[in-house]
Amino acid sequence: MNSFLGFIKKEFYHIFRDPRTLMVILGIPISQMLLFGFVIRTEIQDVKVAVFDQSNDYMTTRIIDKLESSGYFSVEEYLENTNDVEAMFKKGNIKEVLVFEPGFAEKTLRDGTASVQLLADASDPNIARMVTTYTQNIIRSFEHEEFQQQTVPMQINVQNRMFYNEEAKSVYMFVPGLMAMIMMLVSAIMSSVSITREKELGTMEVLLVSPLRPLQIILGKVTPYLLVAFIDAVLIVLMGNLVFEMPINGSLTLLLSVCFLFIFLSLSLGILISTIAPTQLIAMFISMIGLMLPTMLLSGFIFPIENMPKVLQWFSAIMPARWFNDVVKDIMLKGSGFFSIIKEVAILTGMSVLFVVVSVKKFKIRLE
Amino acid sequence: MDTSRKIIEVQNLVKKFGHFTANDNLTFDVFGGEIFGFLGANGAGKTTAMRILCGLSKPTSGTLQVNGFDVYTQSEKIKKTIGYMSQKFSLYEDLTVAENIRFYAGIYGIGYRERRKRQQELLERLKMPEIKNQLVKSLPLGWRQKLAFLVAVMHNPGIVFLDEPTGGVDPVTRRQFWELIYESAARGVTVFVTTHYMDEAEYCDRVSIMVDGKIEALDTPRKLMEQHNAQNMEEVFLHLARN
């Protein structure tokens, strides 16, 4: 036990004496969090739009008012025709044009339907999609109010309220994703690099010749990173909650337990990588290409899984981060309890067991 | 050298990697307190044999005992009673001298009081007590090598394995290093050393020379030179390696 504690102490010396390591484990989580939170916002604000209103009646005026008062849009121009739409988009200020058909109010009252066309600048498809969705929602809500004023019973509401994230706040999307990414980074990359460093320096042989068992060596190497990654997880949850007001509706204990499970999984991946990689550089490379990129791209952190091609959806199913993302969102936003996340927890546990078994096998082969 | 006490007993050691035979039927003994030189060209199989004796690798066949323990079944006991210094530098450069000592003492289960005593002794042997709190990377290479050796024998092992310990070290430091080895041998530590330097081979009590996985010669340097009618060990080595 004493030699184990000594081992962990030594590992902390390595961490605290290397400015690069310190930067990765403390600097990156905080800076990424602030970056994603303040800069890479995916919600929209004061988007400039133009309107071509061919009816100019009370309904279209109210829709436009509603758009402006939402805070998401500011109407910059009123058009007389749609000829210069393209030129306008090319200039890049206007992101969307609303075209109301003639006789909007009249048609609505008579036929129960009228149409408005949304033209969006899709040179940035994500923003275009968001802008049109926001506009649609505002029109829907107007429609909803109109129907309520009428005395027609049992109207069908076309309600497009976004559940759990009414304001479509992007912070709710990226906090779980960022947690997954940072924990992968700290646990898998840092631990695999630190193990391969001992191999490269030759100290690993000295450790293997010593009375320490391989399992003790591995545990001694990864335990500090377990603690550090856990502190990072707490840090991200705290920042998400205090700075960006992301709620924690579910149990904090459950949330942290799931984080712990995910860190354990990432560490087992890190050990696996270290058994394959002979040098720090290769360990870093495998971790970056094999873990970080897929984690960012396929876990639903940046791109919604539903929009992926089928094949990539299957791939995303083997990404641990994807299941972790789901669980964290469930707990933080929906306030889900243990029984509703049991499937994801089982998958994550299964993956960890698999990686541990494979790493232990690999480690033994290396000793032969 | 105490020929009645066998520290290493190897009989018919064979190690194969697939079809390649790295160690072809090695048989030799190493006696208590001797300095045993293990020589051979690169790829002759000396590192493989040494790794097997240290428990880093498993033999394909043969009977082997280290410190009276069986390599197959008692490797845990062997590990407690051997020291090892690898080809690469084996201390942590971002730790201080004292922290390195504390770490390795911890691994070998040396308690606090005993550690303090041995640390004191070790620094005195190095003749530089003031480096205790310096980071290892700030020390000159020669000092580091000597420190690494003393740390490797800090837990008083029956035998210490040195894998090319003086690679890249200047002649003066090499001589100082060998003085430390003699000192340890005089204290009863058996030294098993591989080296490329033939002048160092002459410092050994006995030398074995491996060629292509086999031990081609094993005797005292003087007898080997007589047998091969050579002026120095270099000539012996070249004579054996060429045939």
Image: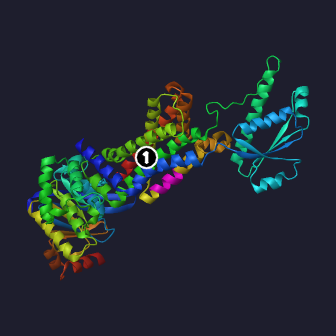
- Tell me residue A289's x, y (percent): 53, 53
Main SS, magenta residues: helix
Numbered circles on residues, count: 1
- Answer with left or right where residue B97 lies relative to residue A183: left
Residue at mark 1: A187
Q: Can residue A229 be seen in the rendering of this structure?
A: yes
Q: Can residue A319 be seen in the rendering of this structure?
A: no
Q: Which quadrant of the figure contains the N terminus of chain B? A: bottom left
Q: Residue at x 40, y 54 (%)?
A: A21
Q: Chain of mark 1?
A: A
A22 versus A331 height, above or below: below
Magenta segment boundaries in residue numbering:
A283-291
Residue A61 in which image quadrant: top right
Say which of B240 and B132 sits in front: B132
A210 versus A356 height, above or below: below
- Tell me residue A246's x, y (percent): 54, 36
* Crowd rating for badge 1 (residues with CA inside 10 Å; few <14, some 14–19, many 20+): many
Say which of B30 and A186 sits in front: A186
Task: Examine the structure image and report whether residue A287 is included in the region drawn in magenta.
Answer: yes
Q: Residue at x 34, y 44 (%)?
A: A219
Residue A146 in which image quadrant: top right
Residue A164 in which image quadrant: top right
Q: Residue at x 83, y 17 (%)?
A: A151
Task: Examine the structure image and report whether residue B34 is included in the region drawn in magenta.
Answer: no
- Tell me residue A347's x, y (percent): 51, 34
Say which of A73 and A140 sits in front: A73
